[in-house]
Amino acid sequence: MLLALDQGRPDRFDGLQSIDYGAVVLYFIVMLIAGYYFSKRQKSTEEYFMAGRSMPWFVVGVSMFATLLSTVSYLSSPGEIIKNGLGIWGGQMHIPFTLALVTLVLIPFFMRKRFTSAYEYLETQYGLGARLFASILFMLNRLFWMGMIVYTASFAMVRMTGLPFIWVVVGIGSIAIVYTTMGGMRAVIWTDVAQFAILFAGLAFTVGFVFFETGTGPATWFNDVMQAEREPQPFFAFDPYVRVSLLGMAIYAMFWWTCTAGSDQVAIQRYLTTGSVGGARRSFASNLGADMTIALSLGLTGMALYSFYLGQLPGTPDQAFPHFIAHGMPRGLAGLVVAALFSAAMSSLDSGMHGVATVLTVDFFRRLRKKALDAAAELKLARTITILAGLFAVGFCLYLNTIPEETRGNLFDLTVRISSYITGALGGMFFAAFLRFRCTGPMMIASGFLGMAVGFYLSLATWLQTHPDIFIYVDAPGQTETARWQPSSDRDNAIGSDSGTNEFVLTGEGVAERHAVVRRTEDGWQWESLAETRINDAPVTQSQIRPDDSIEIAGNRLLVKVKAVSWMWVLPSSCLVTLFSAGLLGLFTRRRAIGAAA
């Protein structure tokens, strides 16, 4: 699919204006007021961590979804629909199966046990070592996840607002730290609900605006998007290198939600605040309902924007929605949506901070300390840990900004891959515990390590390769025969006659009309014949092929991608390897799980 770099419709506004920034400031003030209001109820860690176990189920469900929705997902999902089609909607097929498993099995169990930290359960089954191991995995996962999410969100906000990067990061971090530290779980949940409402309003306005502006509707938008040329997305593919398939997305989503609902403190802590099994079940159902509503709305927004710009997007597909917010929405409303985008980052940050504080306080200080702290001292400790966790995330975010992009690669993709294999391993450990596998604690820890190792290899195997396989996609209509081209030292896979050289030839141009030549060297594959070539919309300054480069030659665009296993399979593989290895190791011991008779 060739997307023009010039937009098909003129902008209504020249970026955000004073009223928009005023809306952002007002929103931040409301967040701080909410933190102060709920701080008056904080007398113990039970209230601070669990909101008295008395929160309304619908509010908890919406909060659970909002805290797991990142700013980058919100901004990039319309672009995913525009660029790659409707494959991500296949993930919604998981809902009936996930809903049944979580509400009928996982939630009744956790509500019956009434834990504060989810990892207390692993100690009852496999000992203290397994509990602390899982707690450490969770904290590492969330700490680095917070830093990466704040970084990617801040980077997107800088592009939309033009504000200095450090201002954005410090603003997000400091406000989230203040209201989370003051208000505890109640403040986190209610601010999540406000964020969800404004994010949904932004999508609803975008769809409504396009509807009235163009006089067209969803049927026309769908037809426009489906007529665009793009790589097909199959219903299912056994090839693990296929990026997205409908059934693959459903399998991934089911594993992600069940592993998160069954092993992630951030999610488990949410439905434990409802106080009853029925309330927790309804909260999870409303969470999946919010997920489906936003997913469908984001898809509809992507189709509407593609039709609105007549296929002539303002930049790349991922930039279409942020550009529309900054240049197409009425002033004031755009500011509220930007404020909600800030809040989306803060929601991920506040939940991570609160989860880390809960786990570190309960699993380490409360469990390992010989003399228990009184209620006031423990609450002070929890607030201190919350602040430190937030400062770590902000510091890690600022550190990431010092690493050159060509070194760290795509951070959002890296975030998904790293969190997937840790989440999968944690989920596998909990499922083994639910099934009462007869493991020892060290066996369970070894199984978790093995699951993460497999997930790590599937996620980041290209890091271990001297010259990873490179695919070059043709981003132009009518180039179906050369839609994929792989530089290779294998003569059978090479387009050119030289086994060490590959030539990219545009369809119909003839062999003599070479537009790109690639030659293998000790440093990997490198471009030659770079006349009239631009890389990433800039004059050529280097010849080394790098993943995610966009090569433009004689008006035609080539996209460079590494051949890698699709991220859809990382989490399921990590989970299943952990689960099956725990079961296999359990065959070699007659020792029952510690809590098997409980």
Image (tube, grey):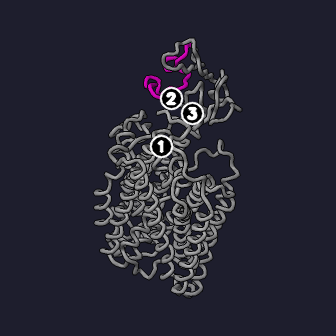
Tell me the magenta residue range: 474-497
Query: Is residue 333 rendered to the left or right of residue 220?
Result: right
Kindly identify the amino acid type of the residue bearing the numbered disc 2. Answer: Val
* Residue 590, image quadrant: bottom left
Kindly identify the amino acid type of the residue bearing the numbered disc 1. Answer: Tyr
Which residue is identified by label 2? 474
Which residue is identified by label 1? 309
* Residue 164, image quadrant: bottom right
Q: Is mark 3 on a helix, strand or loop?
A: loop
Q: Is residue 344 above or below residue 111?
A: above
Q: Nearer the viewer, mark 1 or mark 2?
A: 1
Q: Can residue 138 be seen in this view?
A: no
Label placed on residue 325: none
Q: Which of marks 3 and 1 is in front?
A: 1
- Residues tagged 3 and 1 counted as in contact (Cβ below 8 A): no
Label placed on residue 468: 3
Q: Can residue 56 be seen in this view?
A: yes
Earlier-in-chain disc, 2 versus 3: 3
Expressed as whole percent of the image width and height from the top left, the position of residue 228 reads 41, 35
Magenta-span inclusion, residue 475: yes
Expressed as whole percent of the image width and height from the top left, the position of residue 96 reads 28, 57
Earlier-in-chain disc, 3 versus 1: 1
Q: Which of 140 and 145 is in front in this view?
A: 145
Q: What element carries label 1?
A: loop
Calculate the distance from the C-alpha at mark 3 to the C-alpha at mark 1: 37 Å
- What quarter of the picture does the C terminus occupy? bottom left
